Image: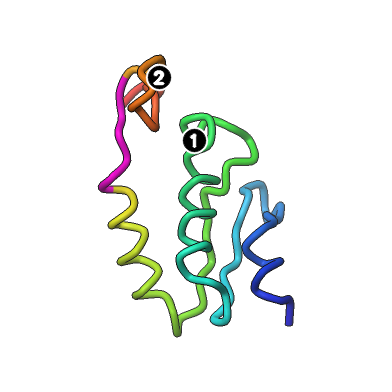
């Protein structure tokens, strides 16, 4: 088994989409932050944006709840505004 610390710090090329794999012994708060930031990097318009996250079923519900909580705090708007976390995308 890969140590959780390492598992939360790398992404794999699996079938054309960058993926994160979150194991049950991972630091859940850190894993959520890493997944959130990697998915949203460059507004998600990056070929290595981690848009697929595999989470062990024993921590899945906790991971989803923490992810939703973090996503609701994300500020979308003008990327030149320092209070904004996420700029516009090409379309809706």
Residue 76 is situated, as x and y percent measured from the top left of the image, at: 31, 30
Q: Is residue 20 left or right of residue 36?
A: right
Residue drawn at x 41%, y 75% is: 60
- Closer to the chain start, of discs 1 and 2, is 1
- Mark 2 highlights which residue? 79
* 1 and 2 marks in contact (CB < 8 Å): no
Which residues are drawn in magenta?
Answer: 72-77
Residue drawn at x 46%, y 31% is: 43
Q: Quadrant of the N terminus?
A: bottom right
For residue 36: magenta?
no
Q: Residue 84: which quarter of the image?
A: top left
Residue 90 is situated, as x and y percent measured from the top left of the image, at: 41, 20
- 78 vs 53: above or below: above
- Mark 1 highlights which residue? 44
Q: Residues within 10 Å of mark 2 (few under 14, many from 20)?
A: some
Q: Is residue 36 left or right of residue 23?
A: left
User: Magenta stretch mostly in which secondary structure?
Assistant: loop
Q: In 3D space, how far apart are the residues under numbered discs 1 and 2 (Cα atoms)?
A: 14 Å
- 10 vs 24: above or below: above
Residue 71 is situated, as x and y percent measured from the top left of the image, at: 32, 48
For residue 74: magenta?
yes
- 89 vs 6: above or below: above
């Amino acid at each position: 088994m890969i140590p959780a610390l390492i598992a939360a710090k790398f992404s794999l090329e699996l079938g054309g989409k960058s993926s994160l794999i979150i194991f049950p012994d991972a630091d859940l708060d850190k894993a959520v932050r890493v997944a959130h930031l990697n998915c949203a990097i460059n507004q998600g318009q990056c070929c290595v944006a981690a848009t697929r996250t595999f989470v062990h079923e024993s921590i899945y519900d906790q991971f989803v709840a923490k992810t939703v909580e973090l996503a609701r705090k994300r500020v979308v708007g003008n990327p030149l505004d320092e209070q904004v976390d996420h700029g516009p995308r090409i379309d809706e």
